[in-house]
Amino acid sequence: MQTNEFHKPVLLEIAVDFLITDPNGIYFDGTLGGGGYSDFILKKLSREGRLIATDLNDAAISFCKEKFRNEQRIKILKDNFKNIKKILESMNISKINGAVLDLGISSYQIDTADEGFSYRFESDFDLRFNKSEGVPAYELLNQMEADEIGEILKVYGEEKFAYKIAREIENQIKKRKIKTTKEIVDIVSKVTPKHKLNDTLSRVFQAFRIYVNDELENLKQFLNDVIDLIQSGGRIVVISYHSLEDRIVKEFIKKNSQECNCYNETGKCICGNQLRLKRLTKKVIVPDEQEIKLNSRARSAKLRAAEVL
Ligand SMILES: C[S@@+](CC[C@H](N)C(=O)[O-])C[C@H]1O[C@@H](n2cnc3c(N)ncnc32)[C@H](O)[C@@H]1O
């Protein structure tokens, strides 16, 4: 399989240009996928440069182990990027020169029925990045009541009819436990006008995927730790695909790129601001029309980058 068949990287050149400040440095690609970013990073590094890359998806790991089989500078690990601190500790690395996350799922995951991420194919309603850890979405869902389901759809899917859909799911699981993507599609179809069905299904699947994989917490944990692990002058680059993730990255950069502005009498900081980063993207970067035309999955991408002071 060629890289492009596994995943077509989004905002590739600009992301890697932001990331690399020293060709001899050590870099971290937390979302290896089809290795598009890693490949380009390696092209920009010298023979001394090193790259540590993680992914939770078995297919991504085996695809990239094969792809990079003759490449000594990359270390590929099946791990969660939120564990960056432990990963670097285990390799006796105290500081790196930069880290990149290209969040979400790869084209392979969305286009492969067995991965269970798409409402277009019938498979188990699983949604886990790592199928050998945690609990599949259908098992969690079968234990839930309408309020909890509605909350997930509202918060993680920003779905207007969250509670209506949730009540219909609850009605169904009271009669019979659900297991497949088709059952979810059938339930959502009952309460959604036909012309809105695809968008609603995208939000429903997105919401449960974020919930099942704890995606927002993974990102927060990563950002919280990576800032201490990058040496001065090194960079953090994040490409996100929905507003919840982008908000987290934006807030993180904002909080860490301005001085504490608490002028309270106690002298204690309550704003949490610290001057630790220089914001490199004053305005968020998005793909141009040409890229979106060639790759429709680029349309929601947003890139933010910052430099550690
Ligand atoms: C959009 S793809 C990355 C594509 C990659 N940049 C490329 O050029 O091929 C996102 C990848 O991140 C992985 N992923 C998502 N969350 C993860 C996490 N917390 N830890 C490790 N990998 C994760 C997914 O399994 C998927 O393979």
Image: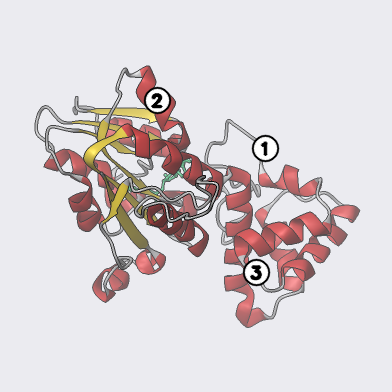
Residue at (25% x, 53% y) in the render: 15
**Residue 90 in the image, given as x and y percentages of width and height:** 38, 18
- Please give left or right for residue 78 compared with residue 51 in the image: right
- Residue 59 falls in image quadrant: top left
Mark 3 or mark 2, whichever is nearer to me: 2
Q: Where does label 2 land, which residue?
A: 87
Q: CA distance from mark 1 to mark 3?
A: 23 Å
**Left or right: 131 in relation to 234:** right
Reading the image, the residue beneath label 1 is: 135
The quadrant of the rendering that contains the C terminus is: top left
> Is residue 9 visible in this depiction of the protein?
no
Front position among marks 1 and 2: 2
SS for dot 3: loop
Q: Return the residue found at the far left.
A: 46
Q: Is residue 88 above or below residue 118?
A: above
Distance from disc 3 to disc 2, alpha carbons, whole Å, reads 36 Å
Q: Say which amino acid is labelled 1.
A: Val
Q: Is mark 1 within 8 Å of ligand 1?
A: no
Q: Are marks 1 and 2 in contact (CB under 8 Å)?
A: no
- Element under label 2? helix
Q: Amino acid at mark 3?
A: Glu
- Which labelled disc corresponds to residue 46? none
- 167 sits to left or right of 83: right
- Cα–Cα gap, marks 1 and 2: 24 Å
Amino acid on which disc 2 is placed: Ile
Q: Earlier in the sequence, mark 1 or mark 2?
A: 2
Of callouts 3 and 2, the N-terminal one: 2
Q: Residue 159's mark? A: 3
User: Which residue is at a point 56% across and 62% down the rendered structure image?
Assistant: 120
